[in-house]
Image (cartoon, helix red, strand yellow):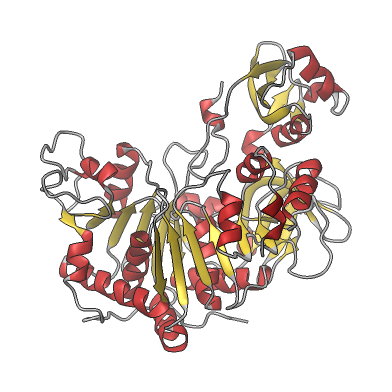
Amino acid sequence: MDVVGNRTLGSVWDELVERAGGRTFLTFEAANGGRQEYTYASFAALIDQTANLLLDMGVEKGDAVVTQLSNCPELLMAFFAAGRIGAVIVPLHARSTVQECGSAVERTAARVVLCDGDSASAYGAGAESGAGCVHVPHVLVARSYEPEMFPRAMDFAAERDARPTTLVSRPPVDSDDIAAVLFTSGTTALPKGVVLTHANLVFSGLFVDWEADITSRDRLLTTMPACHVNFLLSGMMPVLMAEAQLVMIEKYSASLFWRQAVDYRATVVQSVAMILRTMLATPEHGWERQSCVREVLYYLPVTDQEKQRFEERYATRILNSYGTSETLVGAITDPPHGERRWPSIGRPGLGYEARIMGEQGEESCPGAVGEIQIRGVRGRSLMKEYFDDQAATSAAFADEGWIRTGDLGYADADGWFYFVDRRSSLIKRAGENVSPAEVESVLAGHPDIEAAAVIGVPDPVRDQAVKAFVVLRSAAALTVEQVQEYASQRLAYFKVPTIVEFVDSLPQTDTYKVAKGLLD
């Protein structure tokens, strides 16, 4: 059954203005504490003004528009404006390097970049346009435009506000048309661009509304970077499709996050392991159990102890799920109602199938570890393709529409799935496979360890050695031998770290995951 039909971002906004124009759509809290609020109708007018600006700049259907912004309303204006006129949005992280930006602009032949003052110089917008700048026909600066600093750029707010509040031209857009390209940080040297259609976006919203039982009464609060699928597909689109309210926080703060959830009366929040663990490390307050949060949308498990501590302390519950950028959302998920089997990542959600495949191409029996594969419909419940990369697209899809995730897991006899590790992360030690996630989970259970990351390093005898980077809790003291002894009581001998390095913190990626590529 096709639940999307021919709906597009443009048609969805037409419906929203008609049915929910006076309702609050977005509340934004900036890092400095400033707040902005928009109704569906007022934000739709800003979207159309932005779309008219893009049209005046020569953007046509199929053209790419790049954004490089931290979480802010202007990013969403550009996202939906591009969709209104059939253009393709390419959202980059605010901290992307000049090289990364240049690659994305060149590969997509982008005509317009919308950025803030911190990144404008990368596009030659400053008074001095030196070598190494990214060439793009038009540069718009949002939130921090200063004419004397950016003579080669335009003030986004001023240019937008000079345009009509209703769309002056509307090219025909189909649900199968491309709406976005999201460049992912994977294991390859050149990031792959996940191509998403309008149907992908609409489906994602409908799916997560089912998954988390989101309705128009809900307020979804998120600090996830607005350039990634966690925000766009599991946060923003569900809010739209349910006519709910989005609370967008510019920057995550462990000391502020739950206070924000309480103050904004959020009913659903998004989280990852880093958020959960840093929240647990903050001092406790009596008001923490007074929130309205009924679900914490989460991705992959932490330890049993951490989950129990978090749910008891904050009087809420975690909804676990598993997905990739290519599968759009948590395609394998805890159900909205009924039984959940932590640490299971759940069962296939509506519109998806899942299986575990062995190395010889056979479907694994219950309990056997193999590759997690997910089946859906390309361009609807799965990505359409990788941008301009037919070889990678062909490699990603197995027979009969199954997508290869490259991740390892298993299923039990009742059809509940469990995540083991990323295939690319496995450590090969003397012929044995060691899962870094398993070792990290054990180490994180130590009362004096705040966080741990495990990698494989070269070993002249055993191929690879297991190395652990350990962050201790404040005032804690452990020796290498104590860490190893703790691990040896809970892990097979070949999984115990032979090298332990104590560090003050772990490097993070743009999506709050540990940047293991920076560890050695």
Query: Which residue is more in the foreground, 483 or 289?
Result: 289
Q: Residue at x 32, y 64 (%)?
A: 78
Query: Which residue is more in the foreground, 429 or 259?
Result: 259
Q: Position of residue 272 (x, y in %)?
A: 62, 48
Residue lying at the far bottom in this picture: please name it: 18
Left or right of residue 199: residue 475 = right
Q: Is residue 314 visible?
A: yes
Query: Which residue is more in the foreground, 242 or 245?
Result: 245
Which of the 4 image quadrants contains residue 444? top right
Which of the 4 image quadrants contains residue 388? bottom left
Query: Which residue is more in the foreground, 146 or 74?
Result: 146
Q: Position of residue 449 (x, y in %)?
A: 72, 28
Q: Vertically, is 519 above or below 133?
A: above
Q: Residue at x 79, y 51 (%)?
A: 312
Tell me the quadrant of the picture where the N terminus can be found. bottom right
Q: Is residue 360 visible?
A: no
Q: Position of residue 231 (x, y in %)?
A: 51, 58
Residue lying at the far front in this picture: please name it: 286
Left or right of residue 301: residue 228 = left
Which of the 4 image quadrants contains residue 467? top right
Residue lying at the far top in this picture: please name it: 460
Tell me the quadrant of the picture where the C terminus can be found. top right
Q: Vertically, is 190 above or below 328?
A: above
